[in-house]
Amino acid sequence: MSYDAFLRELAKAGLSIRKFAELIEMNPNSVSNYARLGEVPDKLAIIAALVAEMSAQSLDYRAVISRLELSAKKPRGGARVGHFGGDRQVPLDLGQ
């Protein structure tokens, strides 16, 4: 689905990108980053289309999604707190 079509589906459901991301436990930046590609993954497209249709049929999609007990995705990469990009190498003892 194109990103523009995705935004139209969200609008039908009365959702912003931020609210949609919160609904499905995603980072809003992760969702909006698809604008650069011009397309969204099929899974997000399906969710947006179903949520829009449920809204059009006056069904409460929020109640359905809240029953799923979703967990937020963990950030990727080897970063740890206080270290940009992680610390993948073993510290070297150079006699300091």
Image (cartoon, grey):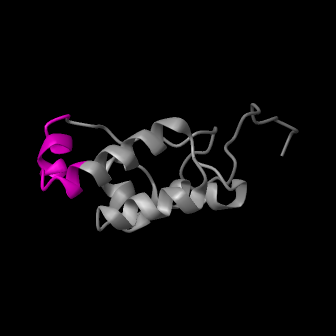
Q: Where on the picture, by quarter, is residue 88?
A: top right
- Please say whether residue 32 is visible from this viewpoint: no
Residue 6 covered by magenta stretch: no
Q: Nearer the viewer, residue 30 or 88?
A: 30
Question: Residue 66 or 81: which is nearer the viewer?
Answer: 66
Q: Is residue 31 left or right of residue 78?
A: left
> Magenta residues: mostly which secondary structure?
helix
Relative to 46, is 51 above or below? Answer: below
Which residue lies at the image location 21% right of the left edge and 56% below the top edge? 55
Badge count: 0
- The relative height of residue 37 versus residue 74 in the rendered view (above or below) is below
Q: Within the magenta stretch, is there residue 65? A: yes
- The x and y percentages for residue 94 are 88, 38
Residue 13 point in image, percent of width and height: 29, 61
Residue 58 left/right relative to 40: left
Residue at x-position 52% and y-position 55%: 31
Residue at 54 percent of width and 54 percent of height: 30
> Which one is in front, 83 or 92?
83
Q: Residue at x 41, y 49 (%)?
A: 26
Specify the farthest residue to the top: 90
Residue nearest the viewer, comparing 51 with 73: 51
Q: Residue extending furthest right?
A: 94
On the image, the x and y values in percent for residue 4 come to 57, 62
* Whole-percent x, y for residue 11 in the image: 37, 67
Would residue 48 appear left or right of 38 to someone viewing this image? left
Residue 56 seen by the camera: yes
* First to last magenta residue range: 54-68
